[in-house]
Image (spheres, rainbow, N blue to C red):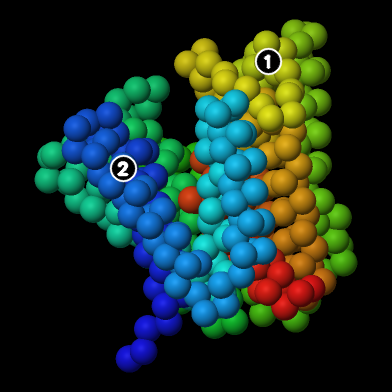
Amino acid sequence: MVVDRKSFTCNAFLLCMNSSFVISMSQLHNTLFGNCAELLFSLCGMLFFIFHFVSSAKFKWKTILEIVTLICVGVVAMLISGGATLLKLVLFFAITQDVKSKDVLSGYKWSLAIPSVIVALLSLIGVIDLYYKGAKVALKFGMQNPNTVPVIVFAIIVAFNLQKEEQLNGEVLLVEAVACLALYYFCRARTAGIIFGMYIILLVLFRNAKRVSKVVSAFQYLFLFFAIASIAIAVLFHSRTAIWYQINNVLSGRPWAWDLYFTRYGIRFFGQRIDLTIAALDNAYLRLLIQYGLLTFIVYLWLFVKISRYAYMNGKVVLFFSVIAYELYFMAEFGPILINFCPVLMYETTLLMNRMQNGE
């Protein structure tokens, strides 16, 4: 069997980078073994990234210059904000050059599944902790936070659905529904359980539709709507009226945290370093704006509106509802917005890179 060189280097990069990231989210982080593994996987990933371009028969200095420029912008944003969100976005987008969408999604899916299963096995045999005992008692399967588990599983499920979008059937969705219930039960992941459930129900009802209904056409701009809503809630909660305290209790204290960070730090173009030990800033829209800055937020806004419009205009029902599910998820969790855990962004990478290659 002939192995496509571009596909191999792309998938090797994804495996290395996501292995490093999964380890950083696990209890292996800040141990000697974990730190060495994170560094080794990151270095190997960058070697595969370089090899992906220099070994190409279509090697173009213009392409390399564009990528290097974007990487430099990402590095500047990382140094200012203390996070590599924009830099990783550039790297993950660039690596999909000349690689088919199905190959990218397949490699992405396994790049998350393999390290996650290894970490889970280590927790099951007692090397690292299986249980989380904090505000709730739940299974965390070796992760630092039990909420990370459903984020990873959801990413794997969505990547599979996007890869097999035309062959999705009731049996597959039934298995995914069982996984959803299991995650809700074992990880006590209420938010993830609700979003998983809504996502699967929408796919059961509409996966065979030939086009996306005009009734939901406004959902193409859901990312912008949720971002505005998040800022509005943070600003309005500052009044501290009785009704807002009641809403705050229903939402587990999230509006209070949103107001706290928004008032204390504000919004800057390249972002800023923030103290995340004060409270949990789970809202991805506000976290992008406050920590990573207006530039990174605009990039994400453009990407999500673009992929939503593509899905709507081309009748990609599975993709459309996958994007909506993630945009809902962003209201309560930051992790899913990272490209390591967001397969809809990986789907979009191949669309953009292929269009660039074709001069569109």
Q: Mark 2 is on which residue type?
A: Glu
Q: Which residue is mark 2?
A: 38
Going by the picture, which residue comes out furthest to the front?
A: 61
Query: Where does the image place residue 79, in percent across and percent down from the top left?
Result: 55, 29
Q: Is label 2 in a helix, a strand or a loop?
A: helix
In this rendering, would 248 be left or right of 240? left
Give the side of residue 251 with respect to residue 111, left or right.
Answer: right
The image position of residue 10, as x and y in percent, is 45, 67
Specify the label residue 265 is tagged with: 1
Q: Residue 318 at what x, y percent from top left?
A: 64, 69
Of badges 1 and 2, the one in the foreground is: 2
Q: Residue 126 lies in what quarter of the image? A: top left
Q: Residue furthest bottom?
A: 1
Residue for point 70% across, 46% down? 300
Residue 132, position as x, y percentages in the image: 30, 31
| The quadrant where residue 351 appears | bottom right
Marks 1 and 2, Cα distance to the nearest angstrom?
Answer: 31 Å
Q: Image point 74% across, 29% down: which residue? A: 269
Q: Residue at x 31, y 42 (%)?
A: 39
Of residue 203 and residue 33, the one placed in the foreground of this image is: 33
The kind of residue on which mark 1 rests is Tyr
Mark 2 is surrounded, within 10 Å at the Cα level, by few (under 14), some (14 to 19) or many (20 or more) other residues, namely many
Instruction: Name the quadrant of the N terminus.
Output: bottom left
